[in-house]
Structure formats: C-alpha cells, structure tokens
Amino acid sequence: MMIVFPAIDLRRGRCVRLQQGDPDAETVFDDDPVAAARRWQAQGARWLHVVNLDGAFGEGRIDLRSLYRGITADLLESLPVNWRLLHSISRGVSIPIQFGGGLRTLDHIRLALMLGATRVILGTIAVREPDMVRQALAHFGPERIIIGIDARDGRVATHGWKQTRDIRAIDLAKAMKDAGARRIVYTDIARDGMLTGVNVEATAQLARETGLRVIASGGVKDLDDIRALAAHRRDGVDGVIVGQALYTGRLDLARAIEIAEGR
C-alpha cells in the first residue's frame, strides 16, 4: 500500500507552500495549521507530513536545557512557534506525523518525538554528520528515523536547499542504507511547488537500486502522478507527499488515497 502524505509546511506559524524551496516565493494557504491537519484527516489521510521551514533555514534556535524535565508548560512556552505547532497538531489529530526541518542533534530528534512526531526526517545532517545519523538510527530505530534526500539535477542539496553538494543522491541513499536506514523521502527540488509532475522514473530508480522504501516528493500535479507512482509500489515506492496540488484544489485527496491504496 502506498501512503499519500498531505504536506503541512510551517513558516513562522502559518501553513505555506514554496516554489523550489525559495523563501521569497511563498504562498500562505492557512493561518491555522491545526485546522489544516484536521481537514486532511477528515478527508481520509492516514499520515501527515509536517515540515518546520524555519528550522530548515536555520531560524528559531532552541534552548534544550530543560528538555529532560519533560513536556512542561514552561518548555512549550520557550519553544519557537513551529515546534509548539507540532505539539498542537499531534494533539489535534489521531493519525501519525512525520516531521522534519532543521533537526541537527539527537536532542532535536528526542524533542520532536516527545512533542508528538511518530518519526522524524533527517536531511542536512545526513551529509554533514553521518556518524550522528548512525547513532540516531541505532538509538531510536529505523522506523522512527527517515532520511530526507533533496536533489537538484541528481546532486544533493542541503541547508534548506541553499547549498548543492558534490554528492549524488543515489550514493547518499546507499550510504544511509549501510548506516541502517530503511526509508527515505526523495525530493526533486526543480519540481517542488511547480505543479509540473513528479519525477516518477528517478524515484523508482532510486528505490530499485538501493532496496530502500522511497517516499516521493516534489511536483505532484494531479491524480495521474499518483497512478504513475502507484505502478511502482513493487519497486519500493512507499508513499507520496502532496502539497501545492492539494492546496490549490487540483488534487482530490480522498480519490488520491483510493488510487494509492489500489481501491
């Protein structure tokens, strides 16, 4: 079964969509991300994909000294708005959440899980500190840790997609598999938010060549993209993240879920 993940991208407390990850190409779709989360659950979503864009862009520093006291009112009040929203969303819906954006340490991961994330996505840190990712996979387990691989022309991009690295996406995926990862989110940056169609072939190829479960992201425009990806379930295409098409009304979530689940 392929999972359709409605995206809730958080920018300074609001639900937004960006084009190709550009913070200057932002469209606000909802001032109430919790209401958006409840709406997608009501339409049949089985998971949510929540991204802290502020964290991905290096904004919203966290003081983690009080982390080990548990989730207290004082801790919540001290957190940046998007982290507080993760907690609110997790309490407002009954479906699981995968959460990413600016997670750089084991304490960041621990905090996200404490605030209600079922699993977290590690992106930039997989390139900068692969040993830390190995520690995270060993400590939290491969069902709680997903690797986010964002690529531009097949090369990995980091730091909110601002920097392109001289490493191929497929090589990073294989290295992360060796580290213990089982699942990745693969984003074609050139297509993200552009409604130009998801990169089906690159996604399926990545799954086939690595043996990893791959969640597709970037460019989904309509139900044909869902059908095309669902045809590669046996290759290892595990899910698809939908954003712009969903928020602009070009994609019917309930029907997308039916197609993804083979109904």
Image (spheres, grey):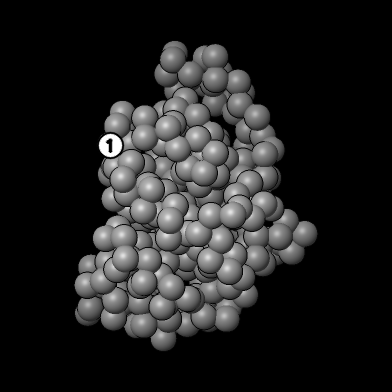
Q: Residue at x 31, y 28 (%)?
A: 139
Which residue is under mark 1?
A: 141
Instruction: Name the outermost residue toward the right.
Output: 24
**Residue at 29% over, 42% down:** 180
Estimate the x, y position of residue 121 in percent, counting from the top left.
44, 46
Q: Is residue 26 visible?
A: yes
Measured from the top left, where is residue 249 in percent x and y?
54, 78
Relative depth, front residue between 220 and 167? 167
**Quadrant in which the C terminus appears:** bottom left
Query: At 48% across and 55% down in the image, what residue appears?
Result: 149
Element type where label 1 sits in the image: loop
Q: Is residue 254 left or right of residue 262?
A: right
Whole-percent x and y of residue 198?
48, 76
Is residue 8 or residue 241 the one in the foreground? 241
Residue 212 falls in image quadrant:
bottom left
The correct choice, above or below, for 251 with respect to 120 in the image is below
Mark 1: which amino acid?
Gly
Residue 253 coordinates in the image, percent (x, y): 41, 73
Q: Is residue 209 left or right of residue 167?
A: left
Residue 87 appears anywhere in the view: no
Return the residue nearer the eye: 182 or 64: 182
Q: Which quadrant would residue 203 be assigned to in this image?
A: bottom left
Measured along the vertical axis of the image, is residue 48 above or below residue 259?
A: above
Q: Going 57% across and 81% down the picture, which residue do you hit? A: 196
Q: Quadrant of the N terminus?
A: bottom left
Question: Is 201 positioned to the left or the right of 19 in the image?
Answer: left
How many numbered marks, from 0 up? 1
